[in-house]
Image: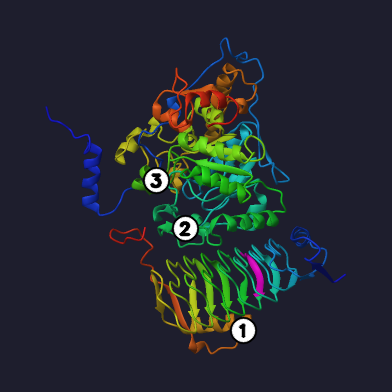
């Protein structure tokens, strides 16, 4: 058999995940997720999973190598702590999408809520729409591309992550500044957009990153 | 004769002068150093006419404990209830982490990772390793999660409830930086809130995810700093915790503001009865959900007292470091050169620890032999266990877990009120209603 189908209307997430952790085939389809939590969490191989409907919290959490596509919206913590692989969502994502993720590619075709990319540690995140406030908070490494707008507090206390925003940006977070968009940045931006399947002119984006003023505990800084 | 002020003592004056000079607050390691009601303020009522003791050294007094048997396929079964608390690689050297694993494994107990991920040395030498799941998620990855024997979701610690962590740049070596995905040499902060959940309802879903990712194999602990302990324990259990860890204000830290350490949180003594009461009301005390208590455990008497008040196990951090060699008089001259003294050294944030424990300096770290450190820790853990057994036998208990509040009295009114045991020689427990009601409820396993 090439593909297996799990209908969550009559089987459990636990049974689904147990199969995905010890897969007997290469591709899976998940029907009627109906907002279930932890759908396709903990994948650690190169399988493909198509989820047809909306998912709850932590869909594709800690994904390591899998390709998970959600044909719907996602709740909090989509692809949190992803290590590698690809997670793509056709709709919108709730809070903390891609939180702490170390690697892989997260594509949100719609918009993402607050704290998108919070504490990201190397993941690439491409958002077709906008992101909410406090996105890329304490973002350590990786790249985030926002084709729409970004809410207030973007990149607060950011470390070495690179942020690209096409639309309006609210008040920048502490220690986050606009930076020059050089050729190498245009090149990586073009690559990220292509990987996400989005078509935008890289010249329309602005780049943001760390001013590196909070890297050392200093008198009067008031940030520790 | 010159008169010193009780309000403006020498230490207070020195701190004002230091603040005026530098413009920064004091950061240090260790836990609260102020005197607070503690286990020293309790005594055991040994057996006599009305109770029957067990023969010391001969009669059986078991010490084992099973942790996390509510949901996990593989609960931890430890031979002693004295566990090693979470301390990070970064705060501690790799050798120190390895020594903790060796010592704990030798006596059949668990050790715990910290804010910075799991090192191969630590995993390799730890028979039972608890993997902390912290707000920063430094070094957090599913492969290590699956290698763990239990998962501890950390909400806070007793030294700084409500605060995140900090590791100053002098301790961020290339290896530490690599594990945390941060540039070497920068002052690094750890968040005080988890990035992808808020509140107990979310935590329930987070715990579900952790169970799903690890195929329901591992116990999930929830660790809180002691503050509103009664409510926090109830909410942790409601969120799905198999084990609740409560860390009192004497619990240590590698680096936090002195003002935070000394002024936020409650003493361990005050937290345990609250935690036990919460579990009793849920019908889960002593069976269902286990309680681990930490913060100022130093001796077998402390172990026994914590367990009598309701803990199923305890965790040690500061005491374990001392057992490894922290604050050893052997390095007295070097402590003095750092402006401290053997017995007072608490600049764990500084990275210049002469004992080679709270450092990332390769030369200093090489001073600690992990094998010798492990041997010393194992010895200490054995002593704690045997001391606790000695007390339990004297109280007529064939298992440490059979110790109960009825075995205890308090030396001070404050300790009696906090621990909810009577002032010695009386039946008075301040704050728990009238004497008749107390005598009808004491010994029934429930406190008024």
The answer to whether any part of residue B185 appears in the image is yes
Magenta stretch holds residue A87 = yes
Left or right of B407: which side holds B429?
left
Tell me the subunit letter for badge 2: B
Q: Residue at x 73, y 45 (%)?
A: B73
| Residue labelled with disc 3 | B264
Q: How many marks?
A: 3
Kindly identify which chain the residue marked by label 1 belongs to: A
Read off the residue under disc 1. Answer: A194
Q: Which mark is residue B406?
A: none
Q: Secondary structure at mark 3?
A: loop
Marked residue nearer the N-terminal end (3 or 2): 2
**Do residues under tags 3 and 2 come within 8 Å of each other at their CB atoms?**
no
Residue B351: x and y, percent? 40, 47
Q: Which residue is mark 2?
A: B191
For residue B256, side relative to residue A75 (left or right): left
- From the viewer's perspective, is residue B106 above or below residue A146? above
Query: Few, some or many C-alpha atoms within 10 Å of disc 1 (few <14, some 14-19, many ≥20)?
Result: few
- Label 3: chain? B
Q: Is residue A217 above or below residue A203?
A: above
Q: Are there few (<14), some (14-19), or many (20+) residues within 10 Å of tag 3?
A: some
Q: Real-space Cα distance between discs 2 and 1?
A: 34 Å
């Amino acid at each position: 058999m090439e593909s297996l189908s799990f209908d969550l209307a009559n089987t459990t997430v636990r049974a689904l995940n147990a199969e995905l952790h010890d897969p007997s085939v290469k591709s899976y389809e998940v029907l009627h997720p109906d907002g279930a939590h932890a759908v396709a969490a903990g994948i650690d191989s190169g399988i493909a999973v198509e989820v047809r409907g909306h998912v709850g919290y932590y869909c594709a959490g800690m994904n390591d190598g899998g390709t998970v596509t959600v044909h719907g919206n996602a709740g909090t913590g989509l692809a949190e702590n992803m290590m590698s692989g690809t997670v793509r969502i056709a709709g919108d994502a709730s809070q903390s999408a891609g939180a702490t993720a170390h690697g892989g590619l997260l594509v949100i075709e719609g918009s993402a809520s607050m704290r998108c990319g919070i504490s990201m540690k190397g993941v690439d995140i491409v958002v077709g729409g906008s992101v909410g406030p406090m996105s890329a908070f304490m973002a350590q490494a990786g790249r985030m591309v926002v084709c729409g707008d970004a809410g207030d507090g973007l990149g607060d206390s950011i470390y070495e992550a690179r942020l690209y925003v096409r639309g309006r940006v609210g008040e920048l977070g502490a220690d986050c500044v606009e930076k020059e968009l050089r050729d190498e940045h245009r090149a990586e931006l073009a690559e990220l957009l292509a990987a996400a399947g989005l078509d935008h002119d890289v010249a329309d984006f602005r780049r943001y990153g760390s001013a590196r003023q909070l890297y050392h505990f200093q008198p009067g800084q008031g940030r520790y | 004769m010159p008169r010193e002020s009780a309000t403006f003592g020498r230490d207070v004056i020195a701190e004002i002068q230091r603040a005026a000079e530098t413009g920064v607050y004091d950061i240090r390691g260790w836990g609260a150093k102020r005197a607070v009601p503690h286990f020293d303020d309790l005594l055991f009522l040994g057996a006599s006419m009305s109770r029957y003791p067990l023969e010391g050294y001969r009669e059986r007094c078991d010490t084992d404990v099973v942790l996390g048997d509510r949901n996990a396929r593989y609960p931890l079964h430890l031979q002693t209830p004295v566990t090693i608390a979470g301390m990070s690689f970064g705060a501690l050297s790799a050798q120190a982490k390895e020594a903790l694993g060796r010592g704990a494994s030798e006596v059949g107990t668990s050790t715990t990772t910290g804010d910075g991920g799991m090192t191969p040395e630590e995993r390799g030498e730890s028979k039972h390793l608890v993997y902390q799941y912290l707000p920063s998620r430094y070094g957090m990855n599913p492969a290590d999660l699956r290698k763990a024997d239990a998962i501890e979701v950390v909400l806070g610690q007793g030294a700084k409830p409500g605060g995140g962590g900090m590791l100053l740049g002098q301790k961020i070596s290339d290896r530490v930086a690599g594990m945390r995905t941060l540039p070497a040499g920068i002052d690094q902060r750890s968040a005080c809130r988890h990035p992808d959940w808020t509140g107990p309802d979310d935590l329930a879903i987070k715990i579900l995810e952790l169970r799903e990712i690890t195929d329901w194999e591992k116990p999930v602990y929830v660790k809180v700093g002691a503050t509103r302990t009664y409510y926090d324990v109830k909410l942790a259990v409601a969120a799905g915790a198999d084990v609740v860890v409560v860390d009192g204000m004497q619990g240590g830290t590698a680096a936090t503001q002195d003002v935070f350490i000394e002024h936020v949180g409650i003493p361990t003594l005050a937290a345990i009865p609250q935690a036990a009461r919460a579990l009793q009301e849920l019908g889960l005390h002593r069976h269902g959900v286990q309680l681990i208590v930490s913060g100022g455990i130093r001796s077998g008497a402390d172990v026994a007292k914590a367990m009598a008040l309701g803990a199923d196990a305890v965790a040690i951090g500061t005491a374990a470091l001392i057992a490894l060699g922290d604050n050893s008089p052997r390095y007295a001259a070097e402590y003095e050169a750092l402006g401290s003294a053997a017995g007072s050294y608490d600049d764990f944030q500084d990275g210049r620890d002469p004992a080679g424990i709270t450092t990332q300096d390769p030369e200093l770290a090489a001073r600690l032999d992990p094998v010798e450190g492990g041997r010393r820790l194992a010895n200490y853990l054995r002593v704690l266990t045997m001391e606790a057994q000695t007390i339990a036998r004297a109280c007529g208990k064939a298992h440490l877990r059979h110790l109960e509040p009825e075995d205890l009295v308090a030396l001070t009114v404050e300790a009696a009120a906090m621990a909810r045991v009577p002032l010695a020689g009386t039946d008075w427990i301040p704050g728990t209603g009238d004497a008749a009601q107390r005598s009808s409820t004491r010994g029934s396993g429930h406190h008024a």
